[in-house]
Amino acid sequence: MTQNIKLLVVEDSVMTTKIIRHLCLKAGDIDARFASSMAEAVSILEAERDEFFAALVDLNLPDAPNGEVVDLCLSKKIPTIVLTGTFSEERRESLLSTGIVDYVIKEGRYSYNYAVRLVKRLKANEGIKVMVADDSKTARHYLRDLLERHRYQVIEADNGAEAIRQLLLNSDTRILIADYNMPQIDGFQLTQLLRDKYEKTDLVILGLSGEGQSSLSAKFIKNGANDFLRKPFNQEEFYCRMMNCVETLELVEQLRDSLRRDPATGLWNAAHFRELANELVEQNEAAEHPRPLSLAVFEIDDFDRINADYGREVADRVLRTVGELVGEALSRFQVCRQMGPTFAAALPGIDAARCATLFDGIIARLNDCDIELEGQTLEVALSGGVCDARGLALDSMLEQAEEKLESARAEGGNYMAA
C-alpha cells in the first residue's frame, strides 16, 4: 500500500486554507496538517515526531511577518513551497536563494492546484534517476543541489565517456543533463552515441551550453536531444523544463502500460504475458541452478451461465472482482487474462504443489466474496490447472496446465489440479 504524503500547511487565510484542504482531500494521498500561525506550526512540528515530507507555507503570518516560518521549515530540512500574495524580482531572488522548492503567488485556484500538484510531483521524483554530465565540478554541484531540492536521485559524470560508463551501471537512469563542452566525448557527440541505443521516450537528454553559437540548440535537438537550455539559465525555467520532461516520460509509460493491460480486469493482456513468461522460462533454463517455475491456467466456473442469466454488466463485475482478487494475491508474479473467463499466471520459485496450495487460498477467498445483486448474492468460483515441468517451452507448459484445467472441470470445478 502506498504511504500518504505528510504535508504541513501553514496559512492564516480561512478561504485559502479551505481551498487547499479541499484539494488535498481530492488528491486522495495527501495527509495534511493545518496551522494558521507560526506558533501553531511549531506546536505541530514538536507534537508530531513523524517527519513531514513537505511544507506549504504562507510567507507573511501575523506572528511571523518576515518569512520566519520558511526558515523554521528549512531548518528542519523539510522541502518548502512558499505561498505569497505579492511579487517582485527582489523578493523572488531572495526566496530562491534560501533553498526553497518553489514559490506560488496567490492568484486564484490554479495557483493552489499547482502547489498541490508540485507536492505530488516531489514524491514521484524520488523514483527518478537523473545523471549530470559536466566537466565543471562547480556546475555539477549546482545542478545536483537544484535537482535534490526536487527530490530527484542524482548521479554525476565529469565527461562524456564517464557518462556512458555510469549509464551502463545505472540502466534505470531516465534523464541525462549533458553539457556541450566536455573532454573526450562532448555533449553533442554523447547525444549522438546514446541515440543509437536509447529512444527519446526511454532516456530524456537535456543539452546545456554556455557557448555563444545560436545554432547549437537546434544542432542538439536535431541530433536527438529532447530539449536544450543555455547557461546561465533561470532556475525556474530549469525546473519547468525538468517537469515537462518527466511528465512526458510518465505519459508515454502510461500509454505503454495501457496497451499491455486487459481493460476489463487491469491485469496484463495475453500478448504481453507471453513476452514476460517466455523471458522467465528462458532465464530459468539459462541459470546454472534453475529454480522451480509454475504456470497456472484457471477460469471462472460457469461464466457462460452467469453471462446468460445476469447479463453483460454483471459478467463484467465478476471479471473485475476476480481480476482484483487474483492481482492482489499474486502481485509478486505475472498474471494475465487470456480471453473470456480464462486467466494465466507464471510463478517463478514455486513448484506445482505450492502453487496449488496458493490457489486453494485464492479460491477460498473468492468463495467468501459474494457479489451483491438486487435481492440476492452471486457466488463465484475458480477452477484451474498447474504445470511445473522444467525444460519445456512455454506453449508446452500452457498445454499441460490446460489439460489439468480440463481435469478440474471434469471433477466439478472449484479447485486447482496439480
Image: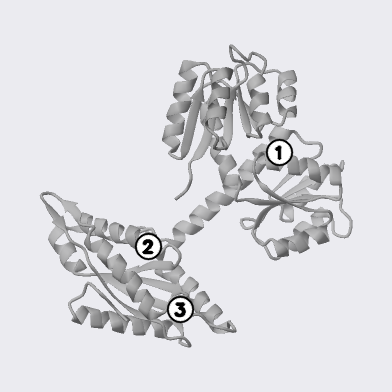
Residue depicted at 57% across the width and 43% down the height: 123
Q: Which mark is residue 4?
A: none
Sequence order check, earlier mark of 1 and 3 = 1
Q: Identify residue type, mark 2.
A: Ala
Residue depicted at 69% across the width and 61% down the height: 170
Q: Nearer the viewer, mark 1 or mark 2?
A: 2
* Mark 2 to mark 3 CA distance (whole Å): 17 Å
Q: Position of residue 324 (x, y in %)?
A: 34, 58
Sequence order check, earlier mark of 1 and 2 = 1
Q: Quadrant of residue 149?
A: top right
- Label count reads 3
Q: Position of residue 61 (x, y in %)?
A: 59, 15
* Mark 1 to mark 2 CA distance (whole Å): 43 Å
Q: Residues within 10 Å of mark 1 (few under 14, many from 20)?
A: some
Q: Residues within 10 Å of mark 2 (few under 14, many from 20)?
A: some
**Residue receiving disc 3:** 293
The answer to whether residue 103 is visible is: yes
Q: Nearer the viewer, residue 399 or 170?
A: 170
Left or right, 68 with respect to 281, comes to: right
Q: Identify residue type, mark 1.
A: Phe
* Mark 1 to mark 3 CA distance (whole Å): 48 Å
Q: Which mark is residue 329?
A: 2
Relative to 284, say whether 22 is above or below: above
Cβ atoms under marks 1 and 2 closer than 8 Å: no
Left or right, 271 with respect to 362, comes to: right
Q: Nearer the viewer, mark 1 or mark 3?
A: 3
Q: Position of residue 82 (x, y in %)?
A: 62, 25
Q: Identify residue type, mark 3.
A: Leu
Q: Which mark is residue 238?
A: 1
Relative to 364, say whether 43 is above or below: above
